[in-house]
Amino acid sequence: MSLSQPAFLAPAERLPALRAQLKRQGLDGFVIPLADEHQGEYVPERAQRLRWLTCFSGSAGVAVVLGESAAIFVDGRYTLQAEAEVDGTLFARHHSGTQTPEDWIGGHLRAGMTLGYDAWLHTPNAVKRLCDACAKAGGNLEACAANPIDAVWSDQPPPPRAPVVGHDLEFAGVSAEEKRRSVAANLDGASACVLSAPDSIAWLLNVRGGDVPYSPLPLSFAILRADGGVDWFIDPRKTSPELVRHVGPDVSLRPVDEFAAAIDATAAGNNLIRVDPAASPSWIFDRVAAAGGAVARGQDPCALPKSCKNPVELEGARAAHVRDGAALTRFLAWLSCEALDGRVNELSAAEALAGFREGNELYQGPSFPTISGAGPNGAIVHYRVSEKTSRQLENGSLYLVDSGGQYLDGTTDVTRTVAIGAPSEEQRRCFTAVLKGHIALARARFPEGTTGSQLDALARLPLWHIGLDYDHGTGHGVGSYLSVHEGPQRIAKTANCVALKPGMIISNEPGYYKAGAFGIRIENLVSVVALGAEPGSEHGSLGFETLTLAPIDRALIDADDLNDRETAWLNGYHHRVRESLTPLVDADTASWLARATEPIG
């Protein structure tokens, strides 16, 4: 067995093996993001390098390894998870909001050291930050010819090869030809655009795949020309004659190994090529420059039109949420009977919910791993249950379940928090504050041009009034049978210059998490709608249409703490839930639903 190819390394052996490989490659350190060549949220097993090295299984994070020290950085969703999964004797664990990888590099890299990175796994924006950090320490940043982890991960899985299929016009709403020509007309003078985001390519060509978990995405690259034609670089083993006919003659399917040469040919002669510096691998920028081209740095031109759902997609989203809400309601009714008898744990609850969704019309699978957290596990924002961690749903505790489904006509994401038995006054106080924030955002009316960051405080204000807050965003965009987390819009404390526009689907999910005790989150998906102008107003207004349909636990609500408008919103929402879902559920569930949606106040 070669020293450079150890097989089936135990977790504790992986860090020393990587350090040995770094020496062989002439590097003093290496940066390991949770990323693949497409910069997507969910990556194939082959690209799970961060998990392989550190055992961290969350969906966002980065590690930095030097010869005598190493650290992992996660955001507020994953701090508790990192503490549970990552060996603190091997990796220092940091909240990226208080210490960034760049801060750590600046303090630990010594003068003259060389820090390596894989140019396929970092955006130019990320590379710039790393370069500045290395310069601050007197060190160097170097793109690796080969990823050193791949050299020591001998049982690394092969690249995925799931079949790619057409996404029918009855669900897509707009033809791929119309999309291609519309996007090509907005390249701002560039002769072509390089696309590396799988959801953008899937949306643009009206195709879907299965290369990554939870999102129906084919991994590929594309070059969109100013005339609307596309060179699509994809493993030919994923394609079929039917797919070739579906995409049409203006889309040329080419093997991925021709991508580099195609960039060279497109960029030659100082041609202007548009590439997104926030979402594309640095390798593309390096290649365009080496070929003599000029890069027009700009947002992925598919991102904004993809986020603004057309009428067919919006109607599909509404229909999908009705079916999904019926499945979730059947689960909640089942849980109300089973949990009090002590027969349910986090795993069995998640399995039961999956069973209620399976068989649903147009259902294709979950849109993300179900978060099923009881008691203190509910305080782990992106908790993932396992046989080792699964807790019983105990009397007096809270149970948080965040789940969603992928349907051919839409993508769902919903969180409900329920009391197991009688809740405490503290639980009801915190839940009611979260509910008040949720209602404030759901009822918001705002002028065109408003961004999500300008609305974020609406959802937090009731919590701030009692000295509480939550360490995650309030809302993320959602795709149409695509990624459950989609940009460019979001609602969060951090600044976002993207204005909310009609047709965008976004989550409304304030929460509160008391470490070691309980977690609370109430999440509905909403779409941005035009409300028109009020009498005497100087401009039109936008607002939200709530799409998600499922009861909110009345046992956790302090009705005396709701004002008249909040009470009216809740009662109106529950009336709509009852009217929409009752025809789709069995008689016992319908009886439970009637009780669960009774008016309060």
Image (cartoon, grey):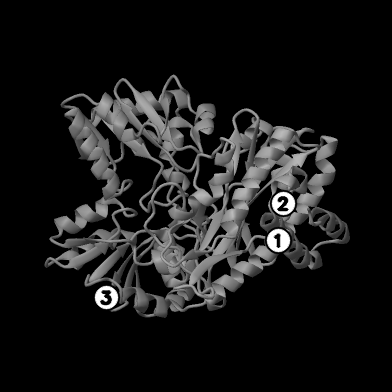
Precedes in sequence: disc 1 or disc 3: 3
In the picture provided, is 388 more to the left or to the right than 355? left
Q: Which mark is residue 203?
A: none
Q: Which residue is mark 3?
A: 226
**Residue ID at (76%, 36%):** 423
Please name the amino acid that badge 1 sits on. Tyr
Residue topped by disc 2: 552
Can residue 522 be seen in this snapshot?
Answer: no
Pair 1/3: label in front: 1
Disc 2 is placed on an element classified as loop
Q: Amino acid at mark 3?
A: Ala
| Contact? badges 1 and 2 (CB < 8 Å) | yes
Instruction: Name the residue at 38% across, 59% down.
Output: 197
Mark 3 neighbour class, 10 Å CA radius: few under 14, some 14 to 19, many 20 or more: many
Residues 214 and 251: in front is: 214
Q: Earlier in the sequence, mark 2 or mark 3?
A: 3
Identified at 39% across, 32% down, the residue is: 98
Residue at the image point whose x is 54% and y is 39% from the top: 469
Which callout, 1 or 2, points at the residue further toward the start of the chain?
2
**Do the numbered discs 1 and 3 sit on residues whose CB atoms are within 8 Å?**
no
385 versus 441 height, above or below: above
- Where residue 272 sits: x, y (%)? 18, 66
Which residue is outermost to the front?
A: 536
Q: Is residue 55 left or right of residue 591?
A: left
Quadrant where the N terminus lies?
top left
Q: Is residue 265 above or below residue 418?
A: below
Q: CA distance from mark 2 to mark 3?
A: 49 Å
Tell me how far mark 1 sits from mark 3, CA to CA: 46 Å
Q: Which residue is denoted by mark 1 in the rendering?
A: 573
Question: In the image, what residue type sits under mark 2?
Answer: Ile
Find residue 415 and report its horizontal and vertical position in percent: 64, 49
Across and down, in percent, residue 123 comes to 30, 49
